Amino acid sequence: MFSATVSAPTNIACVKYWGKKSVALNTPINSSVSVTLDQNDLKAVTTVCVSKSFKKDRLWLNGTEEDVTKSKRFMACISGVKRLATTKVSTEGEVLVDKSEWKHFGVHVSSMNTFPTAAGLASSAAGYAALVAGLAEVFGAKETYPGELSTIARQGSGSACRSLYGGFVAWRMGKDHDTGEDSLAQQVCDENHWPELRALILVVSDEKKDTSSTEGMSTSVNTSKLLGYRASTVVDERMRSIEKAYTERDFETFGKITMQDSNQFHATCLDTYPPIFYMNDVSKSVIKIVHAYNRWKGKVAAAYTFDAGPNAVIYHLEDVADELLALMLQYFPDDKFLGSLFGSSFVNNPQAWDRAKAFGLDDELLRMCDAKGRARGMGGDVKKIYITKSGPGPIVLSKEEALLDPETGLNC
Ligand code: DP6
């Protein structure tokens, strides 16, 4: 039996992927680009065990076994990485497993998220990236061209391909519509490129969303003319501009495109028939308050984006971090009753929370935000706040962090 444990990050797109060119290959109708988030705050941890004695492939997700034998996505990742497997040799040079033998090995996988699954926080991205990275580690997979592993992760979940790299990562849609082999992720800038960049995540709902991305995209592709226009006419120019802005650390351009693209993605959801609503009234209040804040600042200092759910991700720079958190805590504070039960878990960084609580917000700013119609001090609409930044791609962890028993290969 051989095993590996890895962790992988989530990512939040600034130019969104929405719509599939090929459902079978899971290729997109447009390119997209995202920030990979720091695994110290949000991550998926996955252990992969392989053995000739395993009768079938099995998966435990957050401790519960799921039937994956019929999951095309899961199986595509296993067979994709097995194809790139190499011969395993011991440190003494003895052949342990010849690469032709791997096809006889069964695969056990156990995966955990440190954040709400399927609530629009890109949990499938982190999960499939961790799966592919874990399989690649166990099988000693070698890419035959850069980004090949990301083409496999893409077949698990489109956005997962971007989680195989740290920093700012583009998913190039590709031209080869028969194989999808050039529909892959490419790092634009690594995680150290823009150390001042921050993301504030407001978890508005930690429940599973009612329309999955896959289902929503399919209805959008079939019914929304706006989506077709977006893919053919808008996205390429946005990709060029935002990649340049990120490379030059130009927050204003980066932030404006991020907000506009989130808005256009949700507009295509509204243009879908029947329409899909991912944002709710709390999300809309966040949008209004961010625009009021930017107006007061006289520039784009905060930029929201929303995936397929109501949770807000607000990109900003470190110099406004305390002020922005203080502002959000005015309008989206914790539920005092639940807070007293769960202690200090509302904000993932207690020091930042303390600094924000002590921050003296400007009266004029509060007046401008009050005018947007959301009452101050109304707790409970935001369940949890994460403060995070950009981080690296998957990381190989030690044996001590394994989620599968090293003797039996069963979930611990
Ligand atoms: C709104 O990657 O979850 O988050 O490929 O069907 O698994 P599938 O979809 P998924 O869609 C993510 C959509 C998005 C935008 C984005 O991350 O680019």
Image (cartoon, rainbow, N blue to C red):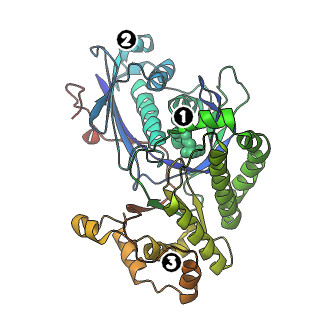
The residue beneath circle 3 is 323
Whether residue 115 appears in this view of the structure is yes
Q: Quadrant of the N terminus?
A: top left
Where residue 209 appears, as percent x and y from the top left, is 45, 44
Whether pointer 2 and pointer 1 mark residues with C-beta atoms closer than 8 Å, the reply is: no
Q: Amino acid at mark 1?
A: Glu
Mark 3 CB within 8 Å of ligand 1? no
Q: Earlier in the sequence, mark 3 or mark 1?
A: 1
Quick one: 380 or 199, which is closer to the camera? 380
Extreme residue in the front direction: 274
The residue positioned 45% from the left and 61% from the top of the image is 202
Quick one: 11 or 220, which is closer to the camera? 220
Q: Amino acid at mark 2?
A: His
Q: Amino acid at mark 3?
A: Glu
The residue positioned 53% from the left and 87% from the top of the image is 362
Q: Quadrant of the C terminus?
A: top left
Q: CA distance from mark 3 to mark 2?
A: 57 Å
Where residue 241 appears, as percent x and y from the top left, is 75, 54
* Residue 215: mark: 1
Mark 1 CB within 8 Å of ligand 1? no
The residue beneath circle 2 is 104
Ligand 1, by image quadrant, is top right
Q: Is residue 270 left or right of residue 134?
A: right
Image height of 52 relative to 302, above or below: above
Where residue 35 appears, as percent x and y from the top left, is 57, 52
Secondary element type, mark 3:
helix
